[in-house]
Amino acid sequence: MDQIPKMEKRILKFWRQGDVFAKLIAQKKGKRFFSFYDGPPFASGLPHYGHILTSAIKDTVLRYWTMKGRQVPWRVGWDCHGLPVENLIEKELGLKNKRDIEGMGIKKFNQACRKSVFRCTSDWQRTLRRVGRWSDYSQAYATLDNEYIESVWWVFKQLWDDGLVYKDYRVTPYCPRCGTPLSNFELNQPDVYQDIEDESVFVKFPLKDEKKTYLLVWTTTPWTLSANMAVAVGAKIKYVKVTLNGEKYILAKERLEVLDAQKYKIKEEFFGKDLVGKEYEPFYLMKTNESAYRVVAGDFVSVDDGTGMVHIAPAFGEDDAALGKKEKLPTIVTVDEEGKIIRDLGIPGEGKFIKKADQDIKDDLRKRGLLFKAEKIVHSYPHCWRCNSPLIYHSIDSWYVAVTKFKKELVANNKKTRWVPGHLKEGRFGNWIKDARDWSISRNRFWGAPLPIWQCKKCGEQKCVGSVKELEKLSGKKTDDLHRPIIDAIFIKCQKCGGRMERTSEVFDCWFESGSMPYAQWHYPFENKKLVEETFPADFIAEGVDQTRGWFYSLLVLATALTLKDRGLGKSKPAFKNVVVNGMILSEDGTKLAKKLRNYAAPEIIFEKYGADALRYFLLSSTPIGEDYIFSEQRVAETFRRTILTFWNSLIFFKTYTAKNFKAPKSVKPKNVLDRWIVSRLNSVVLEMTEWMDQYELTKASRLLDEFLDDFSNWYIRRSRRRLQKPSNAQEKKEAEETYSFVLLTFAKLSAPFTPFIAEEVYQKLNGEQSVHFDDYPKANKKLIAQELEEKMSQVRQIAATALAQRAAA
């Protein structure tokens, strides 16, 4: 069985020594361009099966279009910035938070980040080369390069000039450990929402005008009670006032079950609108205006859980903030940037992290007789997609792209794109962009492309810089590094008042950087202007389904914003024309593949046992594109035996009974009925295969290869053996040899994008020319398709299969 992996290594050597890849690029130069964008991975970690799957998809499509005569950019890139890199370095250096980084010094920290980002590039190249993915690493782009950053600045400046960028103090998802806001779409990354156990509380807000009468309110975040400004009710919800143990409680009638079957008596019934305006005593009185501490109506209040009453803290909730704005409620921030209760506000647990302060607040309310009950619950709670810390909603300054201003155009551009699988277009992705919100694109961090915004310390005037040349002209200084802290030391003289303008401290969300990739990879518009404009948008991209909330989204948002007017890229353009989306790879028991669980065989083991072709073909054919994959070594082994070994044995059998220097003919005119049938089947498959490949339906296309291989090996070869082994005459053998070799050679070309190693081996044995990939992809000869013959042969095979089954059962 080891002959296949050995053959693949021999082919790798053949490609390398023959400089096949470079010659292929040269051969296609000047041909019609096939545009492809490679989503940049982080090279600070090792590649896994998910990367191998995506690489197999990309490589298969690019090999196909190359054989169709197109000039393909095999360029790859590296994502170098952002929290993924920063978190890794924090762990390595023992840094716990932003204060530790600032204590160490931004310069030293960023130097450590820079050194780390390429540490695994050789491992990536080795793994992807072994899987057969061709890539031009000599032209790889990196998001940390000054040229890349300058193009990101240019993209941002276009949005700035069009009035699509603004700064706002608002509630946003926030990671206290990382000390930075996150975007709403980052909350939809895999594993962000996790089921955790928390202690929820039912608390009693005393009404001002009625003694011993309380609004009964439920919350899963006791710490937010420190910033409570109102209690919301549903205007049309039926509420009741009940007496219980000498006290009166108001809650939704449908939620009386929270009283735990205690003996209560309903005294009154009324609607929520009748409660609006009632005032209550706050738990922790803040200096605020007179509009606080009252009952308000909220259309988001429901009776699905809790008490039908919601405590409102405008500083710590999106719905709360919106309602607070409507009702003119104050926004009081009681938690600092590290997620700790601010000192000297008179709040229990001051100086403690919010989750620890929960207990202090509960204890305080219990002592004051304001805690009705507490109970454990399991609920879904968001965590940071990079450091896995619990997130909070926090009021903070952030820079936004006003996506809601061009949401209509975003939806329209999505309609111009082909999605595989198709249901994602109007489903997961389409629904997402219909509800798109403004995008928080600034991060209060260190290692990233800096926002090119300078603000006057004296008059507040702002200046957005769109290029290095512009910055040099405005500041009179040159720099060879655009990262912090070097860029922070460059100042501009304010044109308005003559004061000093300093750069705002934030860096870009790394999704903004990767979303700028179509332009920044080529340093557009400063270089390669014609190339970018002629090849935009991409003909094809491919990544995992998680990128519907990541790279696919940021690509589309920025492309749509940039083409609201024609800047050379065209008008109203999506970022890509065709996108193939793969599902996640799971273990046999349906769990995620994880090293610590040891629930999968390492890729190197699979390569050594079965070769890369078997792994590629398994990943491309076993599961419909878009669905999750159940990975197991046994299933790869089955693919190896069924497909790769069958293909291999078909070659071995032919070479055994033909002359050593035999070359397959370029075409055939079969006479024998078996020959006519297999050539007809071959052309039918070529026709259907091309249709599926042109539609990027790789799974459907790949399964045709298996079907044909079964026809060829289990029917044609078995019934043609005698003509090769003991022919009646020379002509009979000649016809069999020509048909057999023609079909095998054509099948090698047909399968080359999927299984490049064995396709190359067969091609070399039957042809001996430079490489199968230099050849054209097969075109169907419709004149040789005999539909009636195929149908009759299918019937014969069914009869034979039935007879064999009956014989086996006898």
Image (cartoon, rainbow, N blue to C red):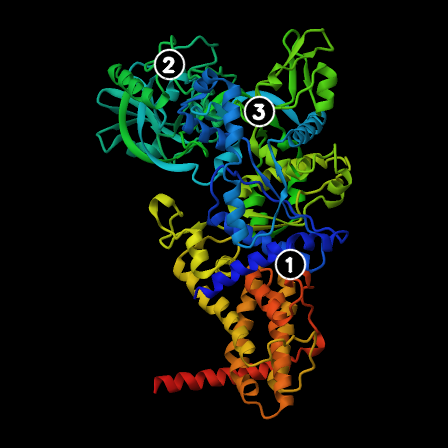
643 above or below 255? below
CB under 8 Å between discs 1 and 2: no
- Judged left or right of residue 59, residue 256 is left
Residue appearing at x 35%, y 53% in the figure? 589
Which residue is at the front of the view, 437 or 202? Answer: 437
Residue under pointer 1? 64
Choose top left, top right, bottom left or bottom right for residue 734. Answer: bottom right
Q: Which mark is residue 282?
A: 2
Q: Earlier in the sequence, mark 1 or mark 2?
A: 1
699 above or below 730? above
Residue under pointer 3? 507
Tell us which disc is closer to us: 3 or 1.
1
> Which class describes the residues within 10 Å of circle 3: few (<14), some (14-19), or many (20+)?
many
Tell us which disc is closer to us: 1 or 2.
1
Residue at the bottom extreme of this rendering: 728
Q: Position of residue 68 (x, y in %)?
A: 70, 60
